[in-house]
Image: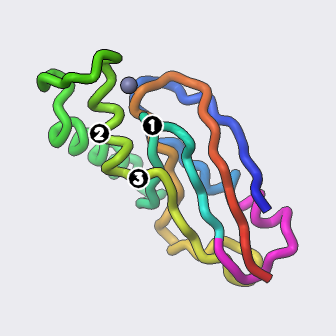
Amino acid sequence: MIKDFLLQTPGRTAFIDITAQVEKIVAGTSVRNGTCIVFVPHTTAGITINENADPSVRSDMIDALDKIVPEDAPYAHSEGNSPAHVKASIMGNSETIIIKDGSLFLGTWQGIYFCEFDGPRKRRVAVKIAGD
Ligand code: ZN
């Protein structure tokens, strides 16, 4: 089963917690044990799983990515958003999460984050659920 949902991202760069949306999709299926793939069908956005408690973890990740991928480096891509493409590939465009007893098997401090690098935009997230 494949489902998707839309997101309006708030700014140029943002980490948006989508755990509740994904958990709701899982809960709407009859799957008790299996896998959930969350896929981002965009080239300037990514996905990651990281700490959901202290928001400064997210801002630290954004700051670290800005250091690794400087805005003012001499990029060739004419659209002018190469840093967003590079950051999207660093984060990756999918996560696989185990479903156990009908819920996402995430650690207490883990959340699923949609990573916007070229917003604000309307984005789509696809979720594939398999199992029994
Ligand atoms: Zn581009």
Picture quadrant of residue 74? top left
- State yes or no: discs 2 and 3 in contact (Cβ < 8 Å): no
Q: Secondary structure at mark 2?
A: helix
Question: Residue at horizontal 29%, vertical 28%?
Answer: 82
Some atom of ligand 1 lies within 8 Å of the CB belonging to the residue at label 1: yes
Relative to the observer, which residue lies in front, 83 or 106?
83
Instruction: Look at label 1 and name its amino acid.
Output: Thr
Numbered circle sitting on residue 86: 2
Residue matched to label 1: 43
Relative to the observer, which residue lies in front, 132 or 49?
132
Residue 22 image position (x, y, % from top left): 68, 57
Q: Is residue 94 left or right of residue 131?
A: left
Whether residue 24 appears in magenta in the rendering, the answer is yes
Question: Residue at horizontal 61%, vertical 63%?
Answer: 37
Some atom of ligand 1 lies within 8 Å of the CB belonging to the residue at label 3: no
Mark sitting earlier along the chain (2/1): 1
Q: Is residue 57 left or right of residue 72?
A: right
